[in-house]
Image: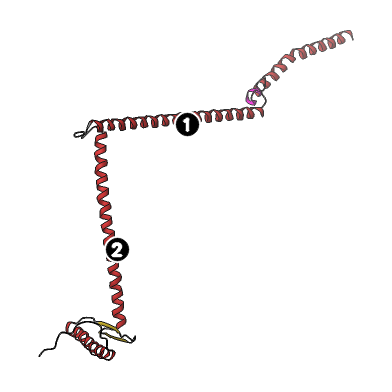
Amino acid sequence: MGRGKIEIKRIENANSRQVTFSKRRAGLLKKAQELAILCDAEVAVIIFSNTGKLFEFSSSGMKRTLSRYNKCLDFSEVAVAEYKTEKQDSKEVDGLKDEIAKLQMKQLRLLGKDLNGLSLKELQLLEQDLNEGLLLVKEKKEKLLMEQLEQSRVQEQRAMLENETLRRQVEELRGFFPPTECSVPAYLEYYPLGRKNSLMNHSSASPDVASDGAVEKGDSDTTLHLG
């Protein structure tokens, strides 16, 4: 006869439980070793008894197997996180695409295109949006014009101040050189005139000298006659 099917539950008898643990532990470790050899697999088994005693088996070293397990576990967690992130990003991308499509449709309608299918109320709202936008554009334009006028006024005042400063500097420079009533001739102009005047003075004085010589000569002749 074959063995009957054993009900899988906790064995109440401590001795029977210990015997069963020893037999099945040895069988499990043997199966793990056979699996590693037959299939060229990396196998590790860790067993703790009810008393806290450790039993283990590893085909490639327990530390190496545990390190590899932790890396795979971390990779699995990273993969799950990446999948969740990609899924969230996909939802956000879909939402952004819908938003872009709505904005493009609104832009076309603001340009007066693709107005088919709009109700009277929607057309009135569109007209209101256009009027509000036009008012904002006019306000912005007026603001820019006022700013340009203000800049021009400031530049004009600055130019006037610079001109006034330059005028004062010129007046200060003129104060260092007092004005003269008559102009002084240059040396080259003055020297020939002085020489000419000296020659004229000599020529004018010569007749007098001649007359004086003539008088003296006449006196000498009279003296001679008288003697």
Q: Residue furthest left?
A: 1
Residue 186 location, x and y as percent?
64, 25
Residue at the image position 79 percent from the left and 13 percent from the top = 213
Residue corresponding to mark 1: 151
Residue 77 location, x and y as percent?
29, 67
Q: Which quadrant is the C terminus positioned in?
A: top right
The front one of 225 and 80 is 80
Residue at the image position 29 percent from the left and 89 percent from the top = 14
Residue at the image position 67 percent from the left and 25 percent from the top = 178
Label 2 element class = helix
CB under 8 Å between callouts 2 and 1? Answer: no
Q: Quadrant of residue 124?
A: top left
The front one of 193 and 146 is 146
The front one of 179 and 47 is 47
Q: Residue furthest right?
A: 227
State the scheme by which the image is colored.
secondary structure
Give the left or right position of residue 181, taking residue 208 as reference. left
Amino acid residing under circle 2: Ala
- What's the magenta region? 183-190
Which one is in front in this view, the residue at disc 2 or the one at disc 1?
2
Considering only vertical position in the picture, is 139 above or below 89? above
Residue corresponding to mark 2: 81
Residue 198 location, x and y as percent?
70, 20
| Crowdedness near tag 2: few (<14), some (14–19) or many (≥20) residues, C-alpha within 10 Å | few
Q: Which quadrant is the N terminus positioned in?
A: bottom left
| Crowdedness near tag 1: few (<14), some (14–19) or many (≥20) residues, C-alpha within 10 Å | few
Amino acid residing under circle 1: Gln
Give the left or right position of residue 122, taking residue 51 as reference. left
Cα separation, mark 2 vs mark 1, equals 58 Å
